Image: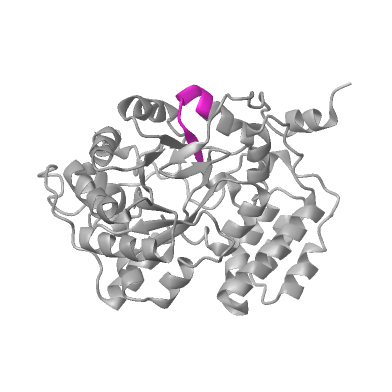
Amino acid sequence: MADPVESVSQELGPAGQVAKAGEFQPLQLGPLAVWPPVVLAPMAGVTNLAFRSLCREQGAGLFVSEMITARGFLNGNRLTNLLASSDPSEKPRSVQVYSSDPIDLSEMVRALVDQGVDHIDLNLGCPVPKVTRTGGGSAIPLKPRLVARLVRAMTSVAGAVPVTIKMRKGISADLITFEDAARAAEEEGVAAIALHGRTAEELYSGQADWNSIARLKQTVAVPVLGNGDIWECWDALRMMRETGCDAVVVGRGCLGRPWLFRELAQVFDGREPDPPPNMGQVALVMRDHAARLTDLFGASTGLRHMRKWSTWYTKGFHGSAAIRGRLHLIESLAELDSLLSELDPDEPFPRSALRTSRAKRGGRQKVRLPEGYLDDLQDDTPPKGPHSPAEIAAHERALEGG
């Protein structure tokens, strides 16, 4: 007779073989040893302290903040500082920074090191048009010398704190940038490189190209982190086995599923994963998450944040579509409890929801770059970034889509 946990795994998704003893090693980032070799992807509007703390309690790993704009941070913007905030229990503390200005990056890294941050990541992959058309985000790796200049500005003041970068394959199939950008970053002392196996043009459509992750592993000597289509714990093992990468970065697959980090910890430790929660257990996680959001942002703003999470958590459960409109209007925790009580608490987690895309839109886009940006790819001149309070606010709103 089959083991009941194994049967659940096979029923709910493509099960695999758990890690063998010694098969994988901790991710080494300077003085940090990360086990399991799993990283929560920085996601705008998602990986604030509330969600990071929820994921951390499910399993160990590295949990990165959402993108923090350097100029907003240096100007003391209230929301920027709130999004960069932490608490004493968050160790190691990891922050992703965003800027195309080496001076701003240097000042920000210096300040974060003084605060005791343990890891700093540079966003070089944001595909949002309002960002790329100013030469930021995924446009930066087009210019390897600019990548080098930005990384140098960070590593020169970071001391023992490891600096990493996260980027995409390139702009489009005709403008693949990751190998040259990776070499430039490695030469300037970057501790690791994370690669999302899609171009900026592809956004989140189609299937991630894991072969590019394997190519990057052959290109650089520093650790390589693979990102793209980690929907289940088995995908993480398969990515590492197929590409040879040193760690996986989990993004959309954990939205509304923080317990994925528990499953990841289990399979990397050589154990079968627990079955996913039923609707009643999901409701308890939702209530906990909502309370953490209101503690962080205040009742009104926290509940507004929770509205989008309600869709992600309940996706695929019977009857959830009927209450979704009301979930998007919740104004109190009691109202959330009442609506969730309309769903069957004993309903098992729906298999169809395991590999369903959440949040980020599909489709493709035409990537917008500054006029003449491709004329000299050896130029290391930083593009003009936002500096006024109004520009910074508009820029951070744009980053919500990154």
Picture quadrant of residue 301: bottom right
Give the quarter of the figure containing the N terminus. top right
**121 shown above or below 144:** below
Picture quadrant of residue 144: top left
Provide residue 16's location: percent of width, then percent of height. 66, 25
Span of residues in magenta: 240-249
Was residue 241 drawn as part of the magenta stretch in this picture? yes
Was residue 297 drawn as part of the magenta stretch in this picture? no
* Left or right, 57 with reference to 122: right
Single out the residue that lies furthest toward the top: 1
* Left or right, 62 with reference to 107: right
Q: Residue at x 19, y 50 (%)?
A: 149
Q: Nearer the viewer, residue 158 or 42?
A: 158
Provide residue 226's location: percent of width, then percent of height. 45, 36
Is residue 303 at least partly visible in the picture? no
Provide residue 235's location: percent of width, then percent of height. 58, 32
Give the quarter of the figure containing the C terminus. bottom left
Q: Residue at x 30, y 68 (%)?
A: 71
* Left or right, 284 with reference to 166: right
